[in-house]
Amino acid sequence: MKDRYEWIGTPVNEATRATLVKGMGYVVQDGGLYPHLTAFDNVALPAQVSGWPTARTRARAAELGEMVGLDEDTLRRYPRELSGGQRQRVGLMRALMLDPPILLLDEPLGALDPIVRAELQAQLKSLFQTLGKTVVLVTHDIREAALLGSVITLMTAGRVVQRGRFADLLERPAAPFVTQFLTAQTLATER
């Protein structure tokens, strides 16, 4: 397991980029799927690029499909034939294909309707606890951050304003921006 983490502390530059990227799974808003590939082919892409045998790729895809609730029939479809929630699940499967130690999720639930979003939030919370991976979740939704994150880092203009548990931000804001950010989201839901 140690070799999976040997790159920690490595500076990011052109020479190290490829190695660093291999240690990270990445999920973007709406899944970021290739439209000309089936869901399965999107999921399998990292394994194919890494030279995995077909049997290993299929077994891993089946395991991940079971984990996120997508069956083989769904994985035969193209992205345009999938719901937003299914596309996000396919994107998550692709990010997990190589079993990276770190997951980066960039607004992964932002484009979903509230019901699907709530379902996926619950599923992600359970998955994160089960997998035991380091997860970096970028979101503008403070409730989502509080639900899924153990540590929240609030930033503005590219700078960290405060880092801590949600209760810390709420009870001991480090700057007026923290209160403004939390209040703006609360007021939006009360209208």
Image (spheres, rainbow, N blue to C red):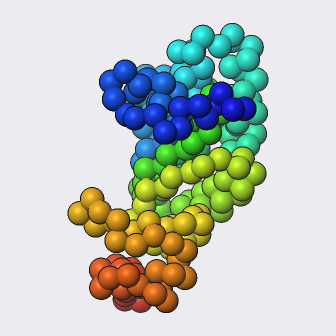
At horizontal 41% and vertical 89% (from top left) the residue drawn is: 190
Image-quadrant location for residue 13:
top left
Figure disc tally: 0
Quadrant of the rendered structure where residue 155 is? Answer: bottom left
Q: Position of residue 128 (x, y in %)?
A: 67, 53
Q: Is residue 184 above or below residue 99?
A: below
Viewer-nearest residue: 6 or 68: 6
- Give the side of residue 85 with respect to residue 61, left or right: left
Residue sitting nearer the eye, 141 or 90: 141
| Depth check, front residue: 111 or 22 | 22
Residue at x 41%, y 25% (from the top left corner): 16
Q: Residue at x 74, y 14 (%)?
A: 55
Q: Position of residue 53 (x, y in %)?
A: 69, 10
The C terminus, quarter of image: bottom left
Report the residue at 43% width, 56% height from top.
138
Q: Position of residue 91 (x, y in %)?
A: 53, 39
Q: Name the outermost residue toward the left.
A: 157
